[in-house]
Image: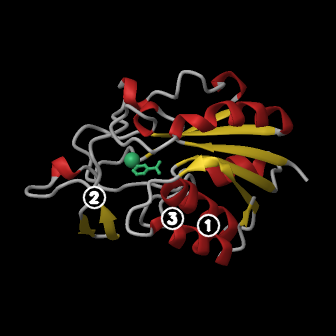
Amino acid sequence: MTRALIVIDVQNDFCPGGALAVPGGDDIVAGINALMADYDAVVLTQDWHPTGHSSFASSHNGKAPYEMIDMPYGPQVLWPDHCVQGTEGAAFHADLNTNRADMIVRKGYRPAIDSYSAFFENDHETPTGLEGYLRTRGITDLTMAGLATDFCVNFSAVDAAKLGFNVTVQTDLCRAIDLDGSLVAAQSGMTGAGVTLA
Ligand code: VGL
Ligand code: ZN
């Protein structure tokens, strides 16, 4: 068994003071750093949007953050502008041990499509390339931690389980946005997909 730690979107905009702050988002950084030594590989993901990205409410006339919109690939939550490429908000939290990362996967860089999952964009078919990276390294088991539990961690964990990886989400090292029951829905979705919630 070869194990990877997948650290999802521990970026300034998802931490207190950021554009899409997740409550307690920075509380998990020290624990994630401490976990890194236990794994054969460490992968970081980075939400990485161009200005004017289609997931931003500001890109749609009359729409406010957290409203829903129908995109060609399905329903999409509209967000405040966040994680714009090259900005301080898109940078990793300053305390995250990025030196230990073997691989950094950026996602959400196509203007017309969002990408919550580390494996597939929100059309559930455009790959990020992470599956190939993990398989060619012989990795079978994944532990996930990071932000946000109910969006990017959830989508990443469910996709990884569908792809056949053994997936554990380290819930004490995740924090949620929790829009309209999205955390409870994510927990049952992950469990139903065969993800272990630790
Ligand atoms: C995320 C909303 C928009 C996340 C990213 O990392 O969970 N959520 N972009
Ligand atoms: Zn985003």
| Point 23% across, 53% down: residue | 65
Q: Is 135 or 180 nearer to us in this picture?
A: 180
Mark 3, Cα crowd under 10 Å, few <14 / some 14-19 / many 20+, is some
Outermost residue toward the bottom in this view? 192
Give the mark nearer the N terminus: 3 vs 1: 1
Determine whether 19 is above or below 149 in the image: above
Determine whether 27 is above or below 165 in the image: above
Q: Is 98 or 187 nearer to us in this picture?
A: 187
Q: Tell me the quarter of the picture where residue 167 sits.
A: bottom right
Residue, disc 1 = 158
Please, what is the three-letter code of the amino acid marked with disc 3? Leu
Q: Is 137 or 98 nearer to us in this picture?
A: 98
Residue, disc 2 = 66
Residue 183 is marked as: 3
> Ligand 1 closer than 8 Å to the CB at disc 3?
no
Residue 109 drawn at (x, y percent): 38, 43
Residue 164 drawn at (x, y percent): 74, 68
Secondary structure at badge 3 equals helix
User: Which is in the foreground here, disc 2 or disc 1?
Assistant: 2
Real-space CA distance between mark 2 and mark 3, rounded to the nearest whole angstrom: 15 Å
Secondary structure at badge 1 equals helix
User: Which is in the foreground here, disc 3 or disc 1?
Assistant: 3
Residue 189 drawn at (x, y percent): 58, 74
